[in-house]
C-alpha cells in the first residue's frame, strides 16, 4: 500500500470519530471534549475535514463538471446541457450546487471543531498545536475561498459561532478578510514539509495566498508571494518529451512529483476513495476508463475557435483530447486528461488544485499587472511552461518555441498571452471559468467563442433554499444573489 492509499485509508477509518453528519447538527460519535487530546486523535479530526471536499458532489466530480462546461471550450450534455445557456441554473443544477454548499460547510464545521478543541488537548506540544491548527485554518480558509468566488458573501461560521444557526451573509470583502487571516496564520505556522502527502505545508499556503491576491487584484502581493514559492527551490516542472508523459502529472500513478504543490488525493483502493471525475469525462468502451463514462461534456475541433486555434503540435492538445463520435458530428472530441485504463469502479487520479505551472503563470501575469509591463523574468517564467508543452527542457531557452518579449512588450498583449497559455495548461482542471470571471472577460469570451449572451445572474450561484429555510438571518428576497 503506497503513501496515498494509506492517507485515504486513515481518512476512511477515522472519519466517524471526528465529523458531524450535517451542518446544522451538533457533533456526534465521540464527545469532542474527550477526543482531541492526542496527536492521533487530532489527526483523525483533521482527516475528517478532507472527506466532504473530496466527495463526488464537490471536488471529486461535479464541481469540475460545472466549471468546465462554463468555460468557452466545452459543452454540456444531458442534465448539464442547460449550463450552455449562460442564464443561471435550472432546478437540477441548483440542486447540485446546493450539495456543493453543504459539503463546503461540512468541511468548515469539521475544521472549526479542531480549531476549537485542539488547544485543550492534554498530550499536545506547542509544535503539534501549531501545525495542526495551521492545517485546520488552511483548509477552512480554502473552503471559504471556494465559497466567496462562487456565491460572493456568505455566512461566516467559525469555531465561536458554529452552533448558531441564524447568521447573516457577510460581505464579500468580509469573507476575503476572514479567509486571508486563516491562510496567513497557516503560512506562519505550518511546517516546511506536510505531515502526509496531500496535506498542506507553508508553501501550499503561500500558493493559495497567491491565488487569493490575484482574485483581489492585489497583483503586487500576488507577484511577491508567487516569487517566494519559486525562489524556495522546492518545486520544478516535470519534464515531458511526448504527449503521454503528461500522465506523470495527471495519471493514476502520479503522486508527489516535483510539480505537485497541493493535490486532493484519490486512489482505486481502498474502496470508495476513487476520483469520480473521469467517469463524467469519458465515453464507454473508449479504453481510457473501463468503468464506463457519462461523456457529460464534449468539444468540437472545428466549430470551437478555442480548440481550432490551439496549435496541434502542442503536446498538451494531443494529451488532452481524443475524437469520439456519438451523433454530434465527426469533429466531436472528449477530454482525455484524467484517464485510468485500470480503473474498476473509480479512478486513481488525483485532483491538481495547485501545480508549480500555476505559480509560474500567476507570477508572469502578476508582474505585468502590478508593474504596467512584462519583465524579462516574467516572460521567462511563461516560456518555461510553454517549452515544456512542446517537449523541450523548461530551463533551457529555445528559439524554436520561445515567445519574444519584444513581440509582447505591451501590458495587455502580454496578459492576454499568459491567459491564453493558462487556458491551454489548465484545460479540464476547473480553473478557466474563475480566470475569466476574475479578469472581467467572461461575457466577452463566451459571446466570441460560443455566440451566447450571458446574463448577469450566471456569474454567481444562488444561496441555497436549504440555507435560508433554516437560517432566518438571511432573507430569501433581499439577501439572494441577483436573478434568483
Image (spheres, rainbow, N blue to C red):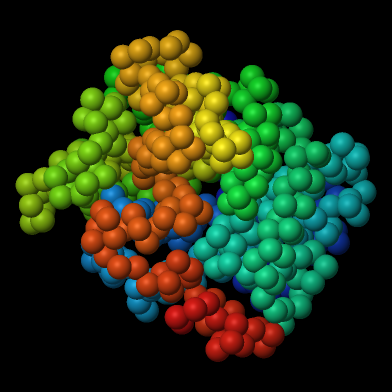
Residues 466 and 307: in front is: 307
Question: Can residue 2 be seen in this snapshot?
Answer: no
Classify residue 363 by image quadrant: top right
The image shows residue 272 at horizontal and vertical percentages of 46, 51
Residue at the image point whose x is 61% and y is 40% from the top: 370
Q: Is residue 49 visible?
A: yes
Work out whether 418 lies above or below 111. Answer: above
Residue 108, image quadrant: bottom right
Answer with left or right where residue 133 lies relative to residue 279. right
> What residue lies at 45% left-to-right and 41% top-to-bottom?
412
Direction from residue 11 to residue 46 in the image, left or right:
right
Query: Residue 211: x and y, percent?
Result: 59, 45
Residue appearing at x 48%, y 68% in the figure: 460
The residue nearer to you, when weighing 155 against 174, is: 174
Q: Picture coordinates of residue 28 (x, y %)?
A: 71, 68
Residue pictured at 66% horizontal, 44% vertical = 209
Amino acid at each position: 500500500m503506497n503513501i496515498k492509499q494509506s492517507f485515504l485509508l486513515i481518512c476512511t477509518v477515522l472519519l466517524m470519530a471526528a465529523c458531524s453528519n450535517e451542518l446544522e447538527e451538533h457533533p456526534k460519535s465521540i464527545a469532542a471534549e474527550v477526543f482531541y487530546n492526542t496527536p492521533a486523535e487530532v489527526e483523525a479530526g483533521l482527516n475528517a475535514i478532507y472527506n466532504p471536499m473530496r466527495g463526488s458532489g464537490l471536488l471529486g466530480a461535479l464541481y469540475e463538471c460545472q466549471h468546465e462546461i462554463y468555460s468557452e471550450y466545452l459543452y454540456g450534455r444531458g442534465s448539464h446541457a442547460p449550463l450552455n445557456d449562460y442564464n443561471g441554473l435550472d432546478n437540477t443544477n441548483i440542486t447540485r450546487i446546493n450539495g456543493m454548499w453543504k459539503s463546503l460547510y461540512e468541511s468548515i464545521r469539521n475544521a472549526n471543531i479542531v480549531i476549537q478543541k485542539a488547544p485543550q488537548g492534554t498530550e499536545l506540544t506547542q509544535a503539534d498545536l501549531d501545525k495542526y491548527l495551521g492545517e485546520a485554518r488552511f483548509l477552512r480558509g480554502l473552503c471559504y475561498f471556494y465559497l466567496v468566488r462562487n456565491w460572493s458573501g456568505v455566512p461566516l461560521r467559525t469555531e465561536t459561532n458554529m452552533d448558531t444557526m441564524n447568521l447573516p451573509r457577510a460581505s464579500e470583502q468580509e469573507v476575503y478578510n476572514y479567509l486571508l487571516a486563516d491562510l496567513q496564520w497557516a503560512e506562519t505556522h505550518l511546517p516546511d514539509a506536510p505531515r502526509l502527502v496531500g496535506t498542506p505545508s507553508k508553501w501550499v499556503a503561500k500558493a493559495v495566498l497567491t491565488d487569493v491576491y490575484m482574485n483581489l487584484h492585489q497583483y503586487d502581493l500576488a507577484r511577491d508571494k508567487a516569487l517566494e514559492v519559486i525562489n524556495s527551490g522546492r518545486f520544478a516542472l516535470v519534464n515531458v518529451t511526448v504527449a503521454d508523459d503528461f500522465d506523470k502529472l495527471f495519471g493514476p500513478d502520479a503522486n508527489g512529483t516535483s510539480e505537485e504543490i497541493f493535490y486532493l488525493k484519490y486512489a482505486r483502493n481502498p474502496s470508495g476513495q476513487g476520483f469520480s471525475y473521469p467517469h463524467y469525462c469519458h465515453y464507454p468502451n473508449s479504453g481510457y476508463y473501463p468503468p464506463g463514462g457519462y461523456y457529460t461534456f464534449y468539444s468540437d475541433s472545428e466549430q470551437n475557435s478555442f480548440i481550432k486555434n490551439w496549435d496541434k503540435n502542442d503536446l498538451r492538445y494531443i494529451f488532452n483530447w481524443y475524437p469520439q463520435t456519438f451523433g454530434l458530428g465527426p469533429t466531436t472530441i472528449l477530454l482525455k486528461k484524467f484517464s485510468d485504463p485500470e480503473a474498476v469502479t473509480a479512478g486513481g487520479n488525483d485532483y491538481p488544485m495547485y501545480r508549480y505551472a500555476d505559480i509560474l503563470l500567476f507570477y508572469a501575469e502578476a508582474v505585468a499587472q502590478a508593474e504596467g509591463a512584462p519583465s524579462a523574468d516574467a516572460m521567462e517564467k511563461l516560456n518555461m511552461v510553454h517549452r515544456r508543452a512542446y517537449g523541450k527542457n523548461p530551463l533551457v531557452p529555445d528559439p524554436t518555441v520561445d515567445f519574444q518579449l519584444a513581440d509582447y512588450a505591451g501590458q495587455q498583449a502580454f496578459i492576454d498571452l499568459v491567459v491564453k497559455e493558462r487556458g491551454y495548461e489548465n484545460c479540464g482542471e476547473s480553473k478557466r471559468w474563475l480566470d475569466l470571471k476574475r479578469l472581467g472577460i467572461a461575457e466577452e469570451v463566451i459571446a466570441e467563442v460560443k455566440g451566447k449572451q450571458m446574463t448577469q445572474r450566471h456569474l454567481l450561484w444562488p444561496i441555497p433554499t436549504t440555507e435560508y429555510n433554516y437560517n432566518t438571518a438571511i432573507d430569501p428576497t433581499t439577501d439572494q444573489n441577483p436573478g434568483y
